[in-house]
Amino acid sequence: MEAYMKNQFPFLGLKAPQRQAACREVIKNSQQLPTPDLLEMIGAYYALREREYQYLAIDLAIANVKRLRKNQTLELAAFVSQKAWWDSVDAWRKFFGLRINHFPDELQEIYHHFHSSDDFWMRRVAINLQLMQKEKTDLVLLTKAILKDQETDEFFIQKAIGWSLRQYSKTDPQWVLSFLKDHQLSPLASREATKHLT
């Protein structure tokens, strides 16, 4: 596990099914906690050394995504930049994606919170925020997110651009083809974007 993550984080060594079984009661009980106590618990787990604890913290957030207030949801965005690597960042992206799925009126504010950041991991969330939105995707925001980092020389950003376009191509392939025709993307982003189009 540590080698797979480029030896950036220590691991307890629990495989996903073991971790999920061990954490099931903690996650279930968290849904009865007052939200300030829940946020404190998420922060405490996230601060622990081994990587599985960050996964648990994010799972706690996901399990409680619908009952947090908007300001509490935005407070959790600070964790995206902490101990950041693709695994945790993409798990947080799932949390924020679920949030806008349940509360579409929060899309603009959540999107701009990530889009305006100098941290490329935060902007990766902005690029991939709408992966689950299908026909509800705000194409203005998606375009804005991609074009801001169109020339960013960062593997995880270019991968995210390709991922967002590939995902949306399942909903509207013609829009993605037109987008690729009108904008010069990196070879990596273009290759990822067209996986379902060729």
Image (cartoon, grey):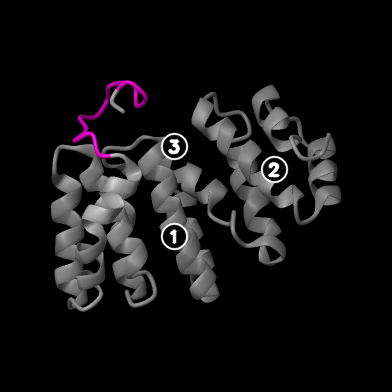
Query: Could you tell me what secondary structure mostly forms the magenta stretch?
Result: loop
Residue at horizontal 72 percent and vertical 64 percent from the top: 135
Residue denoted by label 3: 120
Label 3 is placed on what type of residue?
A: Phe
- Asked whether residue 57 is in view, the answer is no
- Camera-side residue of 95 and 115: 95
- Distance in Å between CA atoms under marks 2 and 3: 20 Å
* Res. 124 in view: yes
Q: Position of residue 8 (x, y in %)?
A: 27, 25
Decide: few, some or many residues near mark 1? Use Cα within 10 Å; few <14, some 14-19, many ≥20: many
Q: Image quadrant for the C terminus?
A: top right
Give how far apart the Cα atoms at labels 3 and 1 are: 16 Å
The amino acid pointed to by label 1 is Phe
Asked whether residue 6 is drawn in magenta, I would say: yes
As drawn, the label of residue 96 is 1
Cβ atoms at labels 2 and 1 below 8 Å apart: no
Determine the CA span between mark 2 and mark 1. 20 Å
- At horizontal 53% and vertical 54% (from top left) the residue drawn is 129
Q: Amino acid at mark 2?
A: Arg
Q: Nearer the viewer, residue 103 or 149?
A: 103
> Which region of the structure is painted magenta?
3-14
Q: Nearer the viewer, residue 12 or 176?
A: 12
Q: Secondary structure at mark 1?
A: helix
Badge 2 is on which residue?
166
Residue 1 rendering spot, x and y as whole percentages: 31, 28
Tell me the SS state at disc 3.
helix
Classify residue 90 as left or right of residue 128.
left
Neighbour tally class for label 2: few under 14, some 14-19, many 20 plus, Cα within 10 Å: many
Q: Earlier in the sequence, mark 2 or mark 1?
A: 1
Q: Position of residue 174 (x, y in %)?
A: 86, 49
Residue 110 highlighted magenta (yes or no): no
Image x and y of residue 26, in percent: 19, 63
